[in-house]
Image (cartoon, helix red, strand yellow):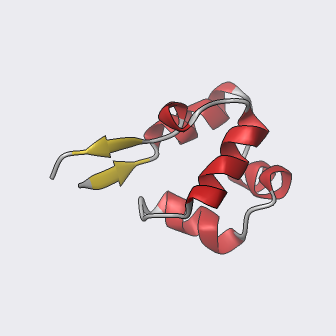
Amino acid sequence: MAVSYKKLWKLLIDKDMKKSDLEREAHITHYALSKLSQGKNVSTEVLGKICDTLGCSVDDIMEFIPD
């Protein structure tokens, strides 16, 4: 099952944030952000940091896409 982070990118647009802003404010690595951009799996710790920073839940930033 594939993962889509389209919701995250839309949320960043809605909050007028750039990916680099998220990287800095959520204290995530550039590597983790790169994996998100490629739709690859990241740790729950990274997802938690993003959710804490944006004040949202995991459902608000990602979804599973059937193969």
Residue at horizontal 63 percent and vertical 74 percent from the top = 31
Q: Is residue 19 left or right of residue 36?
A: right
Q: Residue furthest left?
A: 67
Task: Quarter of the image for the N terminus: give it.
Answer: bottom left
Give left or right: position of 61 versus 66: right
Q: Residue 21 placed where, x, y %?
A: 80, 50
Q: How many numbered tags mark residues here? A: 0
Q: Residue furthest top?
A: 14
> Above or below — where is 11 with respect to 62?
above
Q: In the shown orientation, is residue 46 left or right of residue 23?
A: left
> What's the residue at 59%, 32% (across, down)?
57
- In the picture as drawn, the residue positioned furthest to the bottom comes out as 31
Q: Residue at x 15, y 53 (%)?
A: 67
Residue found 69% across the figure and 70% down from its top: 30
Q: Eyeballing the image, is 29 above or below 18?
A: below
| Above-or-below relation of 56 to 58 | above
Residue 5: x and y in percent read: 46, 46
Image quadrant in which you'd find residue 16: top right
| Percent coordinates x, y for residue 60 in the rendering | 53, 31
